[in-house]
């Protein structure tokens, strides 16, 4: 898909710019031609020389450079590319794009282009969460600009949270999607429900029972379905993950609230239950904070939570065309997952190994076996974003086969 394609890579200012050097290398390996535009800020983080060395000399920095303009011209830069990628996309460049400013080579190319544009934002977590950046992102999405990332994690500024640029592997996957024209439309008429994150089951007003789910996989799936044009409702327990672009996000805490929110989102064509729902809740949570009083602590009485996956799978009329669950197992992963598919009555199970050695909980990678009625399909280990993109593709293919019944 990428071979022989012409990618115009705009590198704006941000510490993540070093990852763009790796991106150029990977694009070269796949047979793409890469031309680069470095903003003034970008050139403070990576040198034009290193970008030129990797891109075969194709690096442009100055809107008013006689050499660049006579040789290339900013209009030709855009015309002679198949896709424009901005990685890292700084808050400043996003703001310029949203406002239609054109005061340097990068922003001028972005205003002049009629090619698909993909942004990989990278910035401090407060900047990403700022209402101005959120407005700009929404405006750019309306304008048809694609996004990959950002992810959440340790940022170079020492803070933790959303803002970290997507990994080169994930940007490559998004580039492939954009080049294949898959970005928009393949799930355009499809409504999707995704559950994500843990649930919190209260013990008293300040304490709760929870689990280690980060929400990374579920949020990535909501984002990937949205990128294919699906209308996505994401029902999520408490996580540190940024809202996936375009999804309607419903925040809940308990399993019962999650079930009610899922039911309120119906009818849907596809339901992906990626949440780690607590199996049990405390039967009688205290209204006031429970205090120590020297006596042995009271035992907690637990009762079973509703099973959302099973409930959705067992719906008669109005059942989603495709109901997909996860099986997080620490041993006999595939055998248990095959059994789980039968027990829950869902169409597909994505099985993953969550034994501590695998580092799946909270980590960025996942190794999946997809189990459907025909058997078991092992997927190569990949980032959670890449797993989500692959799943969204599979869903699009299955929906095309089955048709949409809602
Ligand atoms: O039974 P177990 O928790 O292993 O099943 C995992 C699958 O079932 C996941 O897809 C999870 O989202 C879903 N599930 C659910 N409601 C529950 C428990 C699990 O939707 N109460």
Image: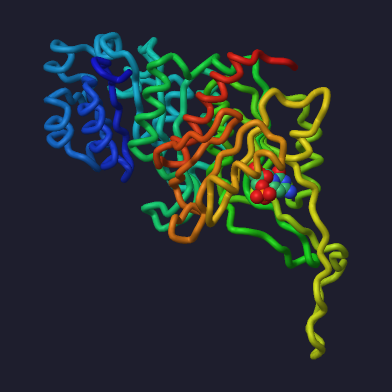
Relative to 89, is 183 on the left or the right?
Answer: right
Q: Confirm whether residue 237 shows in the render.
A: no
Q: Nearer the viewer, residue 121 or 387?
A: 387
Relative to 120, is 70 on the left or the right?
Answer: left
Q: Which of 46 and 173 is in front in this view?
A: 173
Quadrant (top left/top right/bottom left/bottom right) for the C terminus: top right
What colouring style does the render use? rainbow
Expressed as whole percent of the image width and height from the top left, the position of residue 238 reads: 65, 51
Expressed as whole percent of the image width and height from the top left, the position of residue 106 reads: 31, 24
Q: Which of 124 and 334 is in front in this view?
A: 334
Q: Nearer the viewer, residue 339 or 354?
A: 339
Quadrant (top left/top right/bottom left/bottom right) for the N terminus: top left
Q: How many marks?
A: 0
Expressed as whole percent of the image width and height from the top left, the position of residue 387 reads: 47, 36
Residue at the location (21% across, 12% down)?
A: 73
- Residue at far bottom of view: 294
Expressed as whole percent of the image width and height from the top left, the position of residue 70 reads: 14, 10
Q: Confirm whether residue 343 shows in the render.
A: yes
Relative to 22, is 167 on the left or the right?
Answer: right
Residue at the location (81% across, 30% down)?
A: 315
Relative to 334, is 7 on the left or the right?
Answer: left
Residue at the location (79% across, 86% down)?
A: 296
């Amino acid at each position: 898909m990428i071979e022989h394609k012409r990618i115009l890579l705009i590198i704006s200012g941000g510490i993540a710019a070093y990852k763009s050097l790796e991106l150029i290398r990977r694009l070269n390996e796949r047979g793409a031609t890469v031309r680069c535009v470095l903003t003034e800020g970008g050139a403070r983080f990576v040198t034009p020389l290193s970008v030129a060395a990797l891109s075969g000399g194709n690096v442009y920095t100055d809107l008013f450079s006689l050499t660049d303009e006579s040789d290339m011209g900013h209009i030709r830069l855009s015309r002679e590319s198949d896709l424009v990628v901005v990685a890292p996309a700084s808050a400043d460049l996003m703001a310029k794009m949203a406002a239609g400013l054109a005061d340097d080579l990068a922003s001028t190319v972005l205003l002049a282009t009629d090619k698909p544009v993909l942004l990989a934002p990278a910035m401090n977590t407060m900047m990403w969460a700022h209402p101005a950046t959120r407005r700009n992102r929404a405006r750019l999405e309306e304008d048809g600009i694609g996004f990959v990332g950002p992810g959440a994690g340790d940022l170079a500024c020492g803070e933790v949270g959303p803002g970290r640029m997507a990994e080169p592997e994930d940007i490559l996957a998004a580039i492939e999607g954009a080049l294949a024209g898959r970005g928009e439309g393949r799930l355009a008429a499809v409504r999707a429900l995704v559950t994500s994150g843990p649930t919190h089951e209260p013990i008293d007003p300040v304490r709760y029972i929870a689990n280690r789910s980060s929400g990374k996989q579920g949020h990535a799936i909501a984002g990937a379905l949205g990128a294919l044009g699906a209308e996505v409702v994401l029902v999520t327990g408490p996580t540190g993950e940024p809202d996936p672009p375009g999804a309607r996000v419903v925040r809940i805490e308990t399993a019962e609230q999650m079930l009610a929110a899922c039911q309120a989102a119906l009818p849907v064509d596809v339901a992906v239950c990626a949440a780690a729902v607590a199996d049990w809740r405390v039967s009688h949570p205290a209204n006031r904070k429970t205090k120590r009083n020297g006596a042995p602590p009271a035992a907690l009485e637990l009762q079973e939570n509703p099973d959302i996956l099973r409930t959705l799978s067992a719906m008669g009329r109005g059942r989603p065309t495709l109901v997909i669950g996860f099986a997080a197992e620490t041993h006999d992963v595939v055998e248990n997952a095959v059994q789980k598919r039968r027990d829950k009555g869902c169409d597909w199970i994505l099985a993953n190994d969550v034994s501590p050695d695998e580092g799946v909980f909270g980590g960025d990678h996942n190794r999946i076996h997809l189990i459907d009625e025909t058997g078991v399909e092992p997927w190569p280990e990949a980032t959670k974003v890449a797993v989500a993109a692959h799943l969204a593709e599979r869903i699009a293919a299955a929906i095309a086969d089955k048709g949409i019944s809602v």
